[in-house]
Amino acid sequence: MKRFTAWRRRPWAGYAVVLVALATTGVVYAGFSPKADTAEASNSAAAAQDMANGKQLFNQNCSSCHGLNAQGTKDEKGRQIAPSLIGVGAASVDFQVSTGRMPAMNPGAQMPRKKPVEVFRNPKNVADVAAYVQSLGGGPTIPAPEQVDPEKGDVALGGKLFRTNCAQCHNFAGSGGALTGGKYAPPLDESTPTQIYEAMLTGPYAMPLFNDTTLTPEAKRAIIAYVVQTREEPNPGGNGLGRIGPVAEGIAGWTVGMGLLVLAAMWITARKPKKQHD
Amino acid sequence: MTDNNEIEGSQEPKATGGTDGGEGRAPKRVIGTPPPAGERQLIASDEGPPADRPGVEFDERSARKAERVVATFFLLAFLGSLAFIVYFIGFSGRDGGMHGIHRARESNYALGSAMTVAFLGIAMGVTVWVRRVMTTQPLVQQRSELATPPEEKQGFTDSFLQGAEETGLTKRPLLRRTLLLAVAPLGLAPLLLLRDLGPLPEKRLRHTFWGEAAKAAQRSGKKGVRLLVDGTETPLKASDFNSPGGIITVIPEGVEKTHEPLNEIAKAAVLLINIPADKFKPVKGRENWHINGIVAYSKICTHVGCPAALYEQTTHHILCPCHQSTFDATNGAKVLFGPAARPLPQLPISVDDEGYLVATADFPEPIGPSFWERG
C-alpha cells in the first residue's frame, strides 16, 4: 500500500492514469461497437423518437416539393419539379440542408449556399431528417469525422487530384467558376470538410460525382486537406481578388496602377499660378 | 548634340530672340512641320500667351499655406525614412541579421510601407511646392535648323576619307578582304538561330501514348492498356466506376516511364464519364467503344487545346473553360456551341479479364487543335 502511494505521487502518475482510462474506454468501446445493432435495439425507444422527429421535419419542410413519400413531384407536363429522394442517402440530405440549399425558396438554375432555415440550425434536426431519408432507400451515408480530417490528408496528392478533377470548375484555389445557363460552380471557402466529402460523394446538381471506389476515402481526404490548406494560405501583397488568377489580378493592378499614374501626371502638370507682377 | 545646338543657335540672327520676337524672321515654313520657334513656346507651351492665359493670380497668403503643407509632407517623409532605419536596425536586423523566411512578409510590409511614406512624402511635397509656391513665366527657346551645314558635312567626309587612307584600308586589299571574310559568318549566324524553331512535329501530333501502349499490351496477349486514375495511379474497374454522373481523369498505364512523361500525358489525358445508359447514344461504328455508358473522351479541346473537362451531369455537356466550346457527351462529344471545329476524339475502351477498364486502341484521329499538316 505504501509503495502504491509513493508511485501515485510521481509527477507522471496523473498522465498514466488518464492514459489507462482512455485505453480502457477505447477497448471497451471497440468491444461493443460491432454489436451496434444490439446497442441500438436497446436504445430503440430513443431511435424511434429520432426517426419520428425526422419524419415530422421531412413532412413539414421537404414534402411540399419532394412528396409525402419522398417520391418526387412533376408538373402537369411531366417535367420534374423536385427529384425523388429515395436512395439519395443521408450524405446528400446532410449536404443540402446543412449548406442551406434545401429547403429551397424557389427552384432555379442554381441553388445558392445560404444560412439554413431556423429549424435546421440545430444539427440534431439535420441528422434526424438525414436518418429518415436514409431509412427510405439507403444510399451514401454521412462520413465519419475521422474520414474528413484535413490534418490526416496528403496535401500533395490532394492537390494533384484537385487540379485534374475539380479545378476545371472550382478554380485551382477553390474560388468557383461559371457554368452554362446561369449555373455556376460555387467557391469552396465556406464548405466544411464534411460538406466537401458529401459533395464529392453525391454530386449535387450539375456536379459530377466521385464514388468511394473511384476516388477512395483516402483520396477524398487528401482533396479536403488541399482545399482547406489552400484557402487558409495568406495572400501576400494584400487582397487576393478572389484568387481568380494572374490575368484578372494583372488587369486590376494595371488599371488601378495606370489610373493612379494618370491622375498623378494630371495633378503634377496642372496649371500653376502666374506671377503677380509680370 | 548640345554643343551642336549651341553652335547652331549662335548662328541664328539675334533679332528673333526675346519673348515677343518673330517679326524679323522670314516665314520659311514647310507644310506639315510645326510653326517656327518664334511663334510657339516650346516650354510651358500649354499655357498659351501670357496675356490672355487664365489662371490663378499668385497670392502670398495661399503660398504661405502651401508652404506649411509642403513642410508637413517633408516632415512625413523624414518620419518615414526614420521608421525605415529604426525598423531595419531594431527589428528586421535583430538576432544578428535576417530572422528567416517566416518573418519575410512582415518585414517586407514594414520596410516597404516606411519607404513608400518617405518617397511619396518627398514627391508630394515637391509637387505641391512647384504647383502652389513657384510662379511661372513664359520661356522661349530657339529651335535650330535640323540640316547640317554643308561645310560641316564636307569636313566629316574629308576626315573619314583621311582616316580610311591612314589605316591603309584602301591601299591594302588583302586586309580589307580578309576582314570582310571574318565578319561575314557573324552576320549570317542569326539566320541559323531560326533552325531552333524546329524540329518539325512530324507524326508526333497524330498519335498518343494510348496507341503504342495498347499495341504493346495486345502483343503480350492482353486486351489493351489499363486506364489509371491520374494522381493516385491506380487502375480502375468498370464495376468500381459504376455511379451514373461520375467523372475521373485517367492516363495510360506506363506513361510515367516514357521518355517525356509530361509531354505524353499532355496528349493522352482522358476524361472518363459515366453517362446513364438510357441517355447514351453511341456513334455509329463505335457501338462497342463504351461499357454501359462509360465513355472516354480526349480532355484536350479541339479548338486551341485547353483542358475541356467541365462536365455538367445534369445536361451531360462538357464545357471548355477557355472559349466556352460545348460538347455533347451523350452523342460522341459532338460540338453544340462554341468555336471548336470537331468533336472531342473518343478513346475506344473495353474491360479486360479481371474487370479493369482498358483502351483497345489509340484515338481514331489526332487529338487537340488543328495544326498545319493535319489536313
Image (cartoon, rainbow, N blue to C red):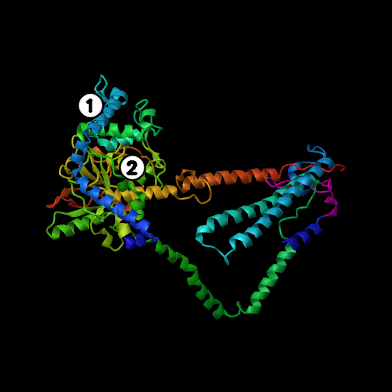
Q: Nearer the viewer, residue B357 or B44?
A: B357
Against A73, residue B101 (above or below) is: below
Q: Nearer the viewer, mark 1 or mark 2?
A: 2
Q: Position of residue A163 (x, y in %)?
A: 35, 49
Task: Identify the chain of the residue marked 2, using the numbered disc in the image.
Answer: A
Which residue type carries mark 2? Thr
Disc 1 or 2, which lies upstream in sequence?
1
Whether residue B31 appears in magenta in the rendering, the answer is yes
Q: Residue A71 bears which disc, if any?
A: 1
Q: Callout 2: helix, strand or loop?
A: helix
Whether residue A104 appears in magenta in the rendering, the answer is no
Against B348, residue A118 (above or below) is: above
Residue at 54% of width from left, 63% of height from top?
A: B99
Q: Is residue B38 visible?
A: yes
What residue does disc 2 label? A194
Q: Position of residue A34 (x, y in %)?
A: 19, 46
Q: Residue furthest top?
A: A76
Q: Nearer the viewer, residue A109 or A113?
A: A113
Q: Callout 1: helix, strand or loop?
A: loop
Against A259, residue B358 (above or below) is: below
Q: Nearer the viewer, residue A148 or A169?
A: A148
Query: Toward which corner of the image does residue A124 lie, by quadrant?
Result: top left
Q: Position of residue A238 (x, y in %)?
A: 53, 48
From the viewer's perspective, tell me whether residue B174 is left or right of residue A214: right
Residue range (magenta): B13-35
Q: Residue furthest right?
A: A277
Report the label total: 2
Task: Identify the chain of the residue marked 1, using the numbered disc in the image.
Answer: A
